[in-house]
Every structure is written in C-alpha cells, then in structure tokens.
Image: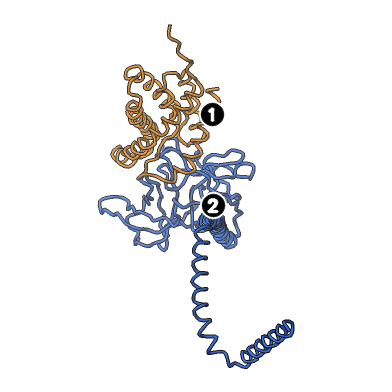
Amino acid sequence: MNITSRNLQTIVFVLIAVGMIALALGGYLTSLSRIFLNPLIEVQAWVYSRFQVAQDLLRAPQDMARLQQRNAQLEAQVSQLQAQIIELQQQLTETRILSALVDFARANPENRYQAAAVIGRDPSPFLRYVIINRGSDDNIRRGMPVVTQQGLVGRIEAVTANAARVQLITDSASVVNAKIQPSGAQAVLKGQASGDLLLDLIPQGVSIEVGNLVLTSGLGGGYPPNIVIGQIAGIRSQPQELFQSATVQSVVDFNQLEIVLVIVNFRPVNIEPLIPEGNQP
Amino acid sequence: MAILLAFLVFILFLMIQIGILSNLPLLQGYPDLILLAIIAWSLRPEVRTAWQWGVIGGLLMTLVSAMPVGVYLLAYLLVVAMAQLTRRMVWQLPFLTMLVMTILGTFLTDSLSLVVLQLMGRDLSIRFVFGTIFIPSVLYNLILALPIYAFIGELAKWVYPVGPIYES
C-alpha cells in the first residue's frame, strides 16, 4: 500500500515537473519567472559587485607593483627610443652636411678635397682656431685652405699625424687677399678680435655697395681664387682717407662648424723672400 | 702618482674645455679649467707637487693652443707662486682664497696673453679685451671655481692621505 502510494506521488511529481518544463519551454511561465528571478538577479548582481570591490581591494598592492614595473619598462623603452631618435636626427644632419659638401666638391672639380670633422676649439679666448680630426697621415699640410659648401673657413696652421689646427679667417692675425664683385676691386680681408671681418685697403675711386660679394682673389698665393667669403654689410668711406673699408658678413657660421673640407691639391706660395726687407711684417 | 694624476686630470679637463666649453662662450670669455685645477691643487696644504702641475698644465695648453710657446707655462708658474704665497698668508679661508686666486690668475693669464699677442702685432684693444674677454672669463671661472676646488681637494686627500693623529 505504502509502495503504491509512494509510486503514485512520484509519478504525479514527475508529471508536474514535465508539465512545468513544457509550460516553461512553451513560454507560458515567462511572466511568472520574471517576478521571481528579477529580485534574485538584482541581489546576485549586488553580491557580485561587492565581491569585485573586495577582490580589487585585496589585489590592489599586487597590481600596483605590477603596473609600476610595467611603467618602468615602458619608460625605459621610451628613453631608448628617444635616444635612437636623437642619434638618427644627428645622422640625418651629418648626412645633409656631407651631401652638401659632395655637391660642392662636384661643382668645383678642379680641387681635391679631404673632409674633416671639427673636434675642438682653441682654449684661448684671444684666438680663433679650430681643431680637425685629419692630419699629415691624410695628406694635410700647413697652409692648405679650408672651406665648407658655403665658403672660406680658413687655412691649416699646424699639423700633427692625426689632427690639424685651422686658423679661421675671423682670427685677428688672419689676412686674406680678396676681390669685390661686381666691381672686381682688390682689397685685404682682416679678422678682428671681435670675430668680425674687415675689408680694408679698398681704393677710394671704386664704387662698392652693401650686398656686394667678396671672394678670394688668389693674389699672394695664400688661397686659391674665387672662393666665396661673404657679402659687404657696411661701408666706411671718408673722403680724406686714401682707402675705403667695409665690414663683411661671412657666409659661414663659424659657431656651427661641424664638417669642413680641406683643399689638398693647393700648395700655398711663400712670397716672403720676394718682399723687400723693409716691407715685411 | 701625483704627476700621473696631473696628466689624467689635465687631459680630461682639456677635452671638456676644447670640446664643450669653448663652444659655450660668455660674450667671448671662456673658462680655463687647467688654471682652476692648478690653483686648487696649489692651495692644498698637503700638496708637494704644485710646481710640477703648473709645468704639465702649461705644456699641455701649449701643445693644444695656438698661443705662442711659453705663455701658458709662464702664466701658470706665476699662478702657482702666487697661490703658494697666498696659502701661507691666508690659509684659514681656503674657499675665499680660491675665489681671489681665480680672479688674480685669470687676470694674470689674460694680461700675459694680451701683451704677448700685441707684441706679435695683433690689433687687440685693452678696453675690448677687458669688457668682452676678461670680465666674462672671470665670471665663468668663478662659477666653476668651487666645484673644481672640491673635486681637486678630494684628489689631494686621496693622493696625500693624512695619517691618524695620536694624542700623547
């Protein structure tokens, strides 16, 4: 009896369950399940969000350390990339300078050039010399002219095996025989203690203007002719004086000298023995 | 040891001077690190090689610079003499002595250079040199004087360690 009653209960329970499932699958229990499930979902969401907060709180120091480590790694990477950018920019600048120098050398095929990097300046504030990284091992000799793609820089004053000292045309002891274009007048370019260039001994009768080009004349044999020096920036002319003088703006920026060209096939001529003794400096 | 150190220090200072500081002029004044090192070394009471440092510094500068031979050598030896004399007179104020000697040493070096270059025919006006070379060089040297004094002082202590003092 008991067994029969229990079996009946089980059958009824299974039928109810199957019926419920059938009703649920048929969509007839949706509204009913919403009433029950929605509060449960809300509670579940609240519980889960609280759990997340608690978990974050517990994890925070570990994450902080990991983030700091990652930050340090990224910062190191940024520094490395910045250094790489600077290096590449430097290489680009050097390449541009070398490219301009190559163009200059091609435009003046009569000369042979030796490129050299400026590696230092004279420690004395009274003198304007630079030191280059080419010397007698590279066929550099005393007196050779030094130029850039812009124009005249100076000439070699002293040479060692692997380095040379260049006297800039702005040095107060530098003297260059020059000519003014378009008049063709001869003059003497002198360096000044201030670093400026003074064009002296311009004959009074010659017409010169601001902006006229100043080139080497080649007279005296110290420099080859027709190397650009600069432009006339100001004229000083007094009627009672024998000569005019002018200040010259050099085409070369002597503060930014990085790479220069030495004209290695030019041999300066020493004309001192030809000058009468009384006229020698 | 002190002589070898002089070469190392001077070569390092020369490289900094001709490679970096000569590109950063104050008007037209440059610092003279060799001069500062020689003054700082000469002012140390324990040092016994000040003259040697003066000679080495002068020779190295002569080698690098286009200045006529002997100008730097003479100037630096005179600076050593002045520094040693000053040290005996005002030994209790080393920093102040360093600053005073920096001014005097710069003046001496620049004056000697000016006189020699003028004798060689260069057109250098005293007013121009005073305003654009001497004063800026003094300022530059004064800025660098104390760090170099401290650096050279540490080297001097390392080369000439003072032994423990035992009281009787």
The disc label shown at residue A26, or none:
none
Compared to residue A227, the image places residue A27 above or below, namely below
Residue A63 versus residue A5: which sits nearer the camera? A5
- Kindly indicate whether the residues beneath marks 1 and 2 are on one polypeptide chain: no
- Please, what secondary structure does the residue beneath circle 2 have? strand
Chain holding disc 2: A
Residue A186 versus residue B72: which sits nearer the camera? B72
Q: Position of residue A221 (x, y in %)?
A: 52, 48
Chain orange in the figure, letter: B
Residue A52 appears in the picture as rendered: yes
Judging by the rendered image, the residue that carries numbered circle 1 is B7
Judging by the rendered image, the residue that carries numbered circle 2 is A260
Compared to residue A228, the image places residue A279 above or below, namely above
Chain blue in the figure, letter: A
Q: Tell me which residue sits at (48%, 32%) in the image.
A: B61
**Amino acid type indicated by mark 1:** Phe
